Structures are given as C-alpha cells and as structure tokens.
Image (cartoon, helix red, strand yellow):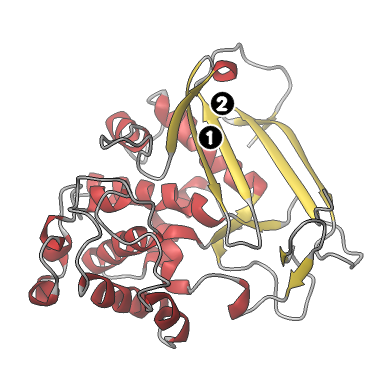
Amino acid sequence: QNLPALGCAVIRSNRIVGFGVTGVRKWGASPKVTPQDVWHHGSLTKSMTATLAAILVKEGKIQWTTRLVDVFPEKAAAMKPGWELATLELLLANRAGALGDLGPSGIWSQLWNHAGTPSEQRLLLLDRLTALAPKTTPGTAYEYSNAGFALAGAMMEKVVGIPWEDLITQKLFLPLGMTSAGFGVPASPRYIDQPWGHTGTGTTRTPMAPGTDADNPPGIGPAGTVHCNLSDFARYVAFHLAGSRGQAELISPEAFTKLHTALENNSNYALGWNTGERPWAQGKTLSHSGSNLQWFTNVWRSEEHTSELQSPCNL
C-alpha cells in the first residue's frame, strides 16, 4: 500500500501479546520507526476526554447533566435558543446539536487564525458556535462533532480552573503511566526524531513538516490532538478492559458502563466509542478511528472470552 510506516499492538487483559512496527518515519528518508516512537491518534482522543469527564464527575467537580449555560452563565444571554439544553453528556455523545462541519460557518478558519492559547481558542469556538442555532435540538439527534467535544473540554477546564491539556495529563495520563502522551504532531520541526504525518492519494505520499499546518487547530484538542507511543495507548485500552471487569480504580464500574453504552436516537455512538457486535468478538465491541488526514489510528476492543495466554509481556 506504500504506507510510510505501520504499527500494531494486541492487548489481552493488562498485557501486550503482540506488538510490531515497520517502515520509516518520513517517506523518502532513511530513519526507521521504532517501538518507542510516538504516533498521532486523532479522534481516539474523544474517549479520553469522556473518561476525563467521568473522573471529574466522581470527584464532584461536574455532573453529566451540567449544562453549558451552568458553566458559562455570563455567555447565556448571547446563546441562541436551544443551547440551554446542551449538557456535558450530550456533547460527549455527539447529540448536543453542535455542527459537524465548521468550514461553511467560517469558524474553522477563525480557529486557525486565532493566535491565542488552546483554551482561548475554545472560548472563541464557544462564542461563535452558540451564536448560531443548534443544528438539531440537543438530545434529539446524532451528529458527529469535533466542536462538541471541544466545548466539553472547555466546560471541564472552566470548572477546575486549568487547561484541558494539563487536566487530562494530571488526571488520566500520569495515573495510567502514559508518560509519552502529549498533544499535536510528535516530531520536532526540521527533524526526523519521530514519525511525520503524510498526505496523498493513491500511491503518492507527501511528508508534512511538523508545524501548525500539520495538525488541526490546538483548540480542537479534546476532540483529536493526543499523541503517544503504542505501548502507552495499550495502557489506556487495558484500563478500559479492566473497567469493564470492575477492576479499575480511577472511576466506578457504573461510569465505565455509561462510557461504553450508546445513547438513543438511531446511533451506536456511546461516549467517545462506537458500539457494535462482531462474530469474532463473541458479542459486543467498542471501536473508534482517528485521523487528522495525515495520520490514521484504529482501535477495536471486545470483552474477553478466552483463557489467559502464557508468557506475555506485562504493560
């Protein structure tokens, strides 16, 4: 397929039972990818943001039913009717009426041109998006939306008082031992010290130099800017597997059930996860893909139905 590089990790319970990477960090260059290299995971960030919300709910910082207008009362008067129904849970379930495509409204280009911090970009998004009527009445329809997750991130950073990037690092990444986790493209400008993103069609591959043009606006972070190595992402998947068995400590089994259960309104989307069933899984699956159009990651998770494997490597 002329891919620059490919990596895969297979997780059973809390152990990696299959792992490999191959290829080069940049198309046309010689440095090869390594098992420690960091990959951009795009919208796989969404379930992480929802998991952060569950942690903050457990701590009493926010509730699933907390509304945008509850967190930002000073902005309520400027919001179009309908937004008063948008809650944290609906934003994380893609059912809050947030636009799926910010391009036609001009908001996407405004985010690109905004020179402020990611938190300031999210406030700009909040102002511009809620100045428009919700695409659908919150709670009535599914619409996949990066903007909705960014607004959820803005709610969480407002109630705690620190940026979402710092908050998710402190509350989720560090407790799970995800020391390689960060945000945006992983490589340094002008260097091939980590894998680069690529564009192209067919068999053509064009490396994208690390920088602002190589990722989405930072304000969209809660929807899709997390990077980490595959071992650390395996730690995150193992955490959700443990949560399904009631063996994770950060949040309750009931919270994992909420994260993994689709809401109504003709969609299989839960909170940052697609739900489904597959014969190979002998039942329920959770999955999601992530891409900033220069990287692509896919994760599938199923309940365990097989006996313990012998001699795997602990995470």
Q: Amino acid at mark 1?
A: Ala
Up the image or down, 67 lies above or below 306; here it is below
Q: Amino acid at mark 2?
A: Ser
Pinpoint residue 15: horizontal percent, then vertical percent. Answer: 63, 30
Between 248 and 69, the one lying in front of the other is 69
- Locate residue 92 relative to residue 234 in the image: left or right: left
Between 222 and 86, the one lying in front of the other is 86
- Locate residue 213 relative to residue 91 in the image: left or right: right
Residue drawn at the location 35% of the way across and 75% of the way down: 105
Q: CA distance from mark 2 to mark 1?
A: 6 Å
Q: Quadrant of residue 81?
A: bottom left
Residue drawn at the location 79% of the way across and 64% of the way down: 205
Q: Quadrant of residue 26?
A: bottom right
Tell me, yes or no, if residue 247 can be seen here. no
Q: Quadrant of residue 269?
A: top left
Q: Report the disc number at residue 13.
A: 2
For label 1, the crowd category at 10 Å Cα-Cα, with few meaning under 14, some 14 to 19 and many 20 or more, is many
Up the image or down, 224 lies above or below 118; here it is above
Q: Report the disc number at residue 74.
A: none
Tell me which numbered mark, 2 or 1, is placed earlier along the sequence: 2
Pinpoint residue 97: horizontal percent, then vertical percent. Answer: 25, 56
- Locate residue 233 relative to residue 84 in the image: left or right: right
Pinpoint residue 213: horizontal percent, then vertical percent. Answer: 61, 78
Residue drawn at the location 51% of the way across and 50% of the way down: 44
Residue marked by disc 1: 238
Between 27 and 12, the one lying in front of the other is 27
Residue at the far left in the pictured view: 77
Contact between marks 2 and 1 (CB within 8 A): the answer is yes
Say how many tags the image has.
2
